[in-house]
Amino acid sequence: MRILVIGGSVFVGHHLVQSALDRGHEVTVFNRGQTDPDAFPAVEKIRGDRNGDLSGLKGRGWDATLDVCGYVPGQVSSLLNTLGQGAGHYTFISTVSVYRAGAPSGYGEDALLVAPSYDDVLTMEQYGSLKVGCELTARELIGDRLLIVRPGYVVGPRDPTHRFTYWVERCAAGGPMIGPSAEQPIQAIDGRDLAGFVIGLVEREVVGVFHATAPDPALAFTEFLGQIAEGTGTELPEVNWTEANDLLPLAEAADDWSLMTAGLGRARAAGLSWRPLCDTARDTLAWVSDARARGTYQQRAGVGMTPDQEREALARHVDHDR
């Protein structure tokens, strides 16, 4: 197949390109060329900006288009209006954040969505609403050629957010640590497994809506950290369990726990599978360790506790327990 990937240089986009190439497809990437421009030297690269310059896509056509970086509806409409029939089968990577809080455990793809937003500016407060707006825009413009994939947290090698990587490095470092609620459910999918699932659906020209996360049922956070520790070859450090706060990546307030319990029956029937979390943790540690050694890892500011912040939190925790 001739596959166009919008993005294709960072994390999920990179894994999508690699998976498509591994399966023998002809891939074109469209991006600004600012991140890892030398990746995939044999792949056709069209330089442009989906927020302004889409001229490189005009008059071209592909069997399938994968849109991994659509965050506001205007980005989706401008892309699809430019491509027209040339988009072929269109895949929009959405999120489980489109669902209303309080969804029942094991909710399906037909659960109630938040109200759509059609704003032009991405804010995290409207992240889910904007993705709903993107989905509806795509449905209006592409019709019956639309595949929507709704991941939960995406983790693993090449993850630029530092959210999962924080816990991998923290477990590997050992010593007493701070964690959120031990009972918090959590689902997360390796970016490579997400990519393989998506490319498999595209090859069969599957349409519809599918969750893409793991596992089912969800892990409790204590199990999540235990599997990470196993993957890093360490014993799980002493964890002082607290509650969600902005310094603990992947921690969710109790009102949002239900979003981490997505049902995967439809996705598994369509071919979704996932590797053990310990394998993802092992590979993530190897990747980040190498990147740090080469000076190429750019840790996102404000994600995770600094050693000083953790020492202060541990001291408060001890005082509270006295």
Image: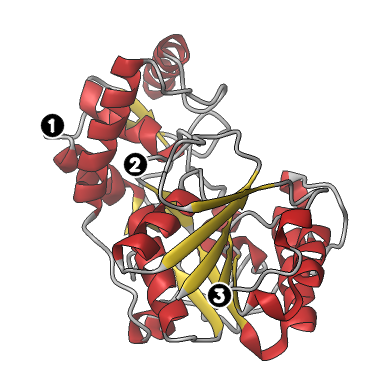
Q: Is residue 227 visible?
A: yes
Residue type for callout 2: Pro
**Residue 23 circle label:** none
Q: Is residue 281 left or right of residue 34?
A: left
Residue to which mark 1 is pinned: 234
Q: Is residue 255 left or right of residue 218?
A: right
Residue to which mark 3 is pinned: 64
Asked whether the residues under the numbered discs 2 and 3 touch, taking CB atoms below 8 Å apart as contact, a structural biologist would say no
User: Residue at the spot x=25%, y=30% of the render?
Assistant: 171
Residue type for callout 3: Ala
Residue to which mark 2 is pinned: 157
Residue type for callout 1: Thr
Q: Nearer the viewer, mark 1 or mark 2?
A: 2
Quadrant location of the N terminus in the rendered image: bottom left
Q: Secondary structure at mark 3?
A: strand
Q: Residues within 10 Å of mark 2 (few under 14, many from 20)?
A: many
In this picture, is 312 found above or below 111? above
